[in-house]
Amino acid sequence: MIDRQEISDFSREFGLAANVIEKDYVLGWLLAGISGHPELGSSWIFKGGTCLKKCYFETYRFSEDLDFTVVQSDHQDEAFLVEAFKQIADWVYDASGIEIPHELIRFDVYTNPRGKMSVQGRIGYRGPLRPGGDLPRVKLDLIGDELLVLDPSSREVHHPYTDRPNGGISVRCFSFEEVFAEKIRALAERLRPRDLYDVIHLFRHDSTKHSRELILSTLEKKCAFKGIPLPTLEFLADKPERAELETEWENMLWHQVPVLPPFEQFWQELPQIFDWLYRTIVKPAPSAMPAMGRAVDVSWHPPAMAQAWHASVPLELIRYAAANRLCVQLNYTDAKGIQKNPVIEPYSLRRTKDGNLLLYAVKYESGEDRAYRVDRIRGAKVTKISFIPRYVVELTTPGIISAPPLTRTRKTGITGNTATRKPKKRTSGFGSYGPKYVFRCMICGRKFTRKSYDAALNQHKNRQGYPCPGRTGIYVTTKYQ
């Protein structure tokens, strides 16, 4: 199991609370256990927002649930599921040290609104943070009455942590075309914020330019199966849930992302999707940002898998901004030592032949192309200023998945599993551990420690004893006690 410091590193890198990172870490190991189970791994099909985050997009919202299509009806039995997940829990513990108490494995079988059987599960876990009180839980949704149009894909699971199993984690999941069609269908049927967020990101993905006809034909079959018409912008705009979609945008998504993009930005992109899907209007294809006077190492590319870079600025936060078409305000010191605070559109991360990382960007106000040395960036703040890309957003272009160096050896798969590390002794209780978030006043520099991830500061005095007008803090680190 990774330690709290690694959780803290990723918390800083992504600008998210430590417990969100911990759950993402646990989800990776649960997927390894499910995919390695002799019965579940060959028949369950992974889907939904967590599937997008873990199998398709290197920079995305952090989803909290595991959604599966279950094609065998006997797998929707409470006793079978509890026993299967006890086996998975034991394997996960032996392989990673994550504890899943058997008494906190629960499944409820119920009749869904369509009159068919569905299952919802809740699984508690003790991860690296080991907080006091009730254990955090992962929710599972298992659906059987669903039309699967295309053959599932086998995808590698993005697990950027240092205890990544030897050989990685792979899982059977919806193909890209199927998950795109399913998300459009879900948007039409229930009009929820996460569906709109997902549909826009799927459209931005490069793969859509090669699979429009397959996405459309899959969508047609799924809508016919559900008995709903093919969605249009007018159809969505006239639904009673349209007003709630906007009002619930922040409530449902804010905790899954470091900075939530404006609702209008995503709603206004919907017409492009329907034009492309139904009228075959080609997506704009901007060119790559040109090199700017420095010898660039063309053989180097940023890793597709998110990682903690240990740089002076959280680079994954900048990649998130690029994926969500949000501008970033830099705190930058140029070669002459002059501090500047440009607002930029981030496009690319490149490395020079002498080893310097460069952030290629466009100054938002002037439209000038710029290259910023990463080691001279002292801070970066994601704004809510959206931009329309002038170049290819290379920061989020899928590439070869790379991973941090491994310090431990694992074999995935419950049958015949081995691990080089001796399992830890199980414990029934907890210490009074928990994350504490440290913020620094933007004006006077005083540090404040909070139990929650809240950057708002109360009235305070600076180090000289005078009242400070600072009301907002900058996140510094997470510590545990």
Image (cartoon, rainbow, N blue to C red):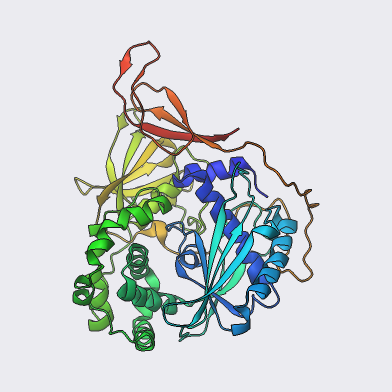
Q: In which quarter of the image is residue 248?
A: bottom left
* Total numbered badges shown on the rendered structure: 0
In the image, is residue 115 above or below residue 127? below
Q: Does the rendering let one see residue 294?
A: no
Q: Residue at x 72, y 53 (%)?
A: 408
Q: Splitting the image into 4 quarters, where does residue 75 fall? A: bottom right
User: In the image, residue 91 lies at what x, y percent?
Assistant: 73, 62
Q: In this view, does 141 lie to the left or right of 256?
A: right
Q: What percent of the width, then of the height, locates residue 40?
A: 64, 76
Q: Is residue 353 above or below residue 330?
A: below
The residue closer to the viewer here, 445 or 211, is: 445
Which quarter of the figure has residue 159? bottom right
Q: Specify the quadrant that holds the C terminus.
A: top right
Q: Which residue is rendered at x = 47% and y = 53% of the image?
A: 297
Left or right: residue 212 compared with residue 75: left
Where is residue 360 shown, x and y percent of the image? 35, 49
At x 48%, y 41%, the residue is 12
Residue 236 vertical placement versus 452 (above, below): below
Q: Kindly identify the residue that appears in the image at 59 percent across and 78 percent down.
A: 76
The residue nearer to you, when weighing 171 against 336, is: 171
Residue 128: tell me if it is visible.
yes
Residue 57 rendering spot, x and y as whole percentages: 45, 63
